[in-house]
Amino acid sequence: MKAITFKAFAITHEIDLNKIAIHCGIPKKFTWEEPLILRGNILKTILGQEVEESQMVLVFSFGSVVFINLIDTNDMMVFFQFFHFFEPDIDLNQTYKYTDDYSLHVRGTETLELTDEYVVVPRYESFYPELISTVLAKSVALEKTEEQLGKIHDKLETMIDRLEKGKLRIGNKELARTTAKIVRHEYNTLAYIMILDKPDITWTSSTANEFYDKMLEFFELNDRYKILKSKTDILYNIMDGFSTISHSIRGLFVEWIIVILIVIEIALTILQIIGWFP
């Protein structure tokens, strides 16, 4: 059997699968847990050319796209432009920034063989393409989020440098914007990519479940998830510290204003008593 090739991209944070499904005439409402699979006549219509039965595109709600047995760069760009029609926020110049290649080989081996570039299985099962695509899609989505987390760290480092220089005041808007980035990061990663969720087939097939678990372990998705979760918690703790310092400074400023006003009032009262002030 000829090797099956996979090419995964993380192109945005979110793709509305139902809008694409309606456009393609697919009478089904998609949830976050399942990908939209484009193949056959639908794929032919989008590409404007004949396609093989083994060629397909899997679109995931968390912003990843996986091409199966489609290696032509022009065909991929046609798809990206097609997706851009539904998701205008997609930056077509950045579509190749987060990507990964993989392949599936079927050989008469007794055991499963996993490597960085391919997986070898004893015999073909219909669920292999979807499970491999799901793992690749989550992996590139995590890669995109990991880089964004680094940018948030850089922002916090700048704020820490300001604190070290004695610039203690941090504006509410700056705190709110940074906190929003952390919340968005957590939502995109921990909630939306759904690292801990499994495809439905893994609940009904022990072979599929075992294969999926091995793929997860090899791509270290659970470990990367835990690291991101830990880093996110640290970011929240740092922001709590910034918020506490900022509120303390504002509280101290208000207290000093009150003290000054009391002193002025006492001074005016004394001046009135001694007749220096009418």
Image (cartoon, rainbow, N blue to C red):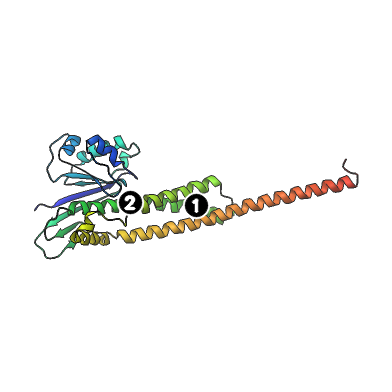
Badge number at residue 158 = 1
Can residue 115 be seen here? The reply is no
Tell me the amino acid under the disc marked 1.
Thr
Whether label 1 touches label 2, CB < 8 Å: no
Label 1 and label 2: CA atoms lie apart by: 29 Å
Left/right placement of residue 176 relative to residue 265 reads left
- Camera-near label (1 vs 2) is 2
Residue 202 x/y as whole percent: 22, 57
Instruction: Look at the image and tell me in which quarter the C terminus lies.
Output: top right
Q: Residues within 10 Å of mark 2 (few under 14, many from 20)?
A: many
Residue 63 x/y as whole percent: 31, 45
Left/right placement of residue 20 relative to residue 278 reads left
Q: Which of the 4 quarters of the picture holds residue 82?
A: top left
- Against 244, residue 64 (above or below) is above
x 18%, y 44%: residue: 56
Residue receiving disc 2: 193
Residue 272 x/y as whole percent: 87, 45
Q: Nearer the viewer, residue 151 or 242?
A: 242
Q: Nearer the viewer, residue 122 or 191?
A: 191
Can residue 262 be seen here? The reply is yes
Q: Which of the 4 quarters of the picture holds residue 198?
A: bottom left
Left/right placement of residue 173 relative to residue 10 reads right
Label 1 SS: helix
Tell me the amino acid under the disc marked 2.
Ile
Q: Earlier in the sequence, mark 1 or mark 2?
A: 1
x 57%, y 55%: residue: 244
x 89%, y 47%: residue: 273
